[in-house]
Image: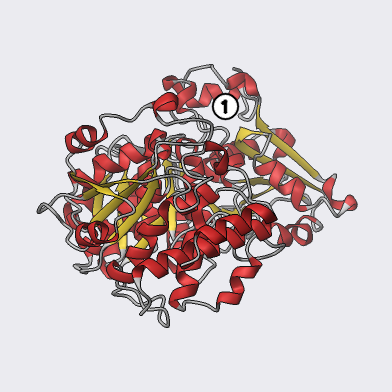
Amino acid sequence: MRNTFIEELVSFARKDPHIALVVGDLGYSVVEPFADEFPDRFINAGVAEQNMASLSAGMASEGYHVFTYSIANFPTFRCAEQIRNDIAYHDYPVTTVSVGGGLAYGALGYSHHAVQDYALMRSFPNMLIAAPGDPNEVRAVMRYLIDNPGPSYLRLGKVGEATHHDNIPQLSPGQWVQIRKGKSNKAILTTGATLQIGIDYLANKKYENFSLYSLPIWSMNSKVSQIDIIKKFDEVVTIEDHLLDGGFGSWLLESCISASDVIGKIRPIALDPVVCGTVGVQKILNQIGGIALGKS
Amino acid sequence: MIDIKNFANDIRRSCLNMVHNANASHIGSALSIADIIAVLYKDVLNVEPKNPDMLTRDRFILSKGHACVAVYSALAIKGFFPKIELNTFAENKSKMMSHISHKVSGVEFSTGSLGHGLPFAVGKALAAKKMESNWRTFALLSDGELGEGSNWEALMFAAHNKLDNLVVIIDYNKLQSLTSVKDTLGIEPLTDKVKAFGWSVRQVDGHNHNQLKNLLGSTPWESEKPSFLIANTIKGKGVSFMENKVEWHYKSPNTDQLKLALKELKD
């Protein structure tokens, strides 16, 4: 995913001289194509994420669309107030990019586990969450973000994610993208890299007749569209590599808070906090956290 | 154009009236920067009241956003918006918040939480360099605000990137919220510290209009180095019973105190 992101960013930067990449001294073997081709628009802010976020807001206030790039919680929690006040409140086009969403940095420990980031980022008015599920969704969300510049959060996996879309889908905030049509009137809905886990669920007898959807772009503002979508289903199971508190499933439940006949259809599957402080490969951690099928 | 002394005096009088009417805090902080603000808006900043978004304008960021009444007053006196709008300060639903707001004409950036103005200004200065624009960026910080680590990140970055189009002014009145800077989180030797970070540093009497004008009008003082002006100021300057009194960080003048203060500032 991260390599696809850079490919897209380079492609857009060729057309738009106001696209800039600001990294927090991370991105080895990923960001070089951008840095090599656009050295004047590649800025290494050093290990200083607060300044990285605020200076990006400053650049954005002068017409740049800035992508800040780091891993896990460093570009979000470390500079949460800078994102809140300087970027989101002022409605500046800064896309905060975090690589290693969820438990992707499995063995690196709690500091590197991004399992509360949705909770933080979705609490800011104006902020758009972009959590693509495969490389084609990365391309799709990049196109949306470039065409609709504003405060946004791009949560990426790491590397090696399978491709599930034959083509690059057209996306808009709050839009569910169908991955597979099932025989029943029940659906699995994923966001981000948990799309692969959703596909694994379909192979399980309990879920074999479910449809599968991905929801790559969502926000506070796109809650309003969810009730009418969920009404069509008998059950919607959400899967996320994030804690339930403040997460994606909770976002969907909040979306339906005014519809008592709809809200009960939603069954969120999110990480158990037991993963906080546990290390291991991502797949095992997702099993321990209760979102991936299989024995932990 | 108004005489600089009268301009500073008008700013102070306006600050007092606004803070009194709103029963707001931070009058000491605003009076401390009144002369700096007057010099900036009269003699230094290239800004156009009728064209506040002019591309070639100098950018001014008030990082100590709690002292906003000084800037709101200067902007109104300059003609960015009608003076009568100052009466809405801190009222319900007012865009004129009691920490500086970008919703007010002429204000670049909202602050309130300390340690945000300089890093943001760094981004503007960097953008100007990238775009080969000649305008300058000024950021006015408080002394106590230097406790925020984000400022030191930005100081490192600005020097490393040779942002000589960036000017920082420290309102060094030596008092912060509860007591003196010295007794809170000492910042001395400030000149040596900031020089060691790669900046060009000068000191000035922050109430001397000529000195301020000469220094702020002549940056960069050293090629390829950002400029850091330590303005030695007096908190509450201009009102004898407020000067150097920490309580005027929070207290709001009552009617009698307002009358007394305005009398001291008459001409």
Residue A94 x/y as whole percent: 43, 56
In the displayed structure, would residue A233 be above or below residue A15? Answer: above
Q: Amino acid at mark 1?
A: Asn
Locate the N terminus of chain B by quadrant.
bottom left
Give neighbour class at mark 1: few <14, some 14-19, many 20+ (Cα, 10 Å).
many
Residue A132 x/y as whole percent: 50, 49
Q: Residue furthest right?
A: A261
**Residue A285 visible, this angle:** yes
What count of labels does the image hold? Answer: 1
Q: Which residue is mark 1?
A: A286
Q: Residue furthest left?
A: B223
Q: Front-most of B1 and B162?
A: B1
Give the residue at x 41% y 78%.
B49
Residue B97 x/y as whole percent: 60, 59
Q: Front-most of B128 and A190?
A: B128
Is residue B126 rendered to the left or right of residue B263?
left
> The numbered mark 1 sits on a residue in which chain?
A
Image quadrant in which you'd find residue A72: top left
Give the residue at x 35% y 57%.
B36
Q: Secondary structure at mark 1?
A: helix
**Residue A222 visible, this angle:** no
Residue A227 x/y as whole percent: 78, 58
In the displayed structure, would residue B220 be above or below residue B152? Answer: below
Is residue A294 rendered to the left or right of residue B223?
right
Q: Front-most of A209 and A69?
A: A69
Q: How is the image coloured?
A: secondary structure
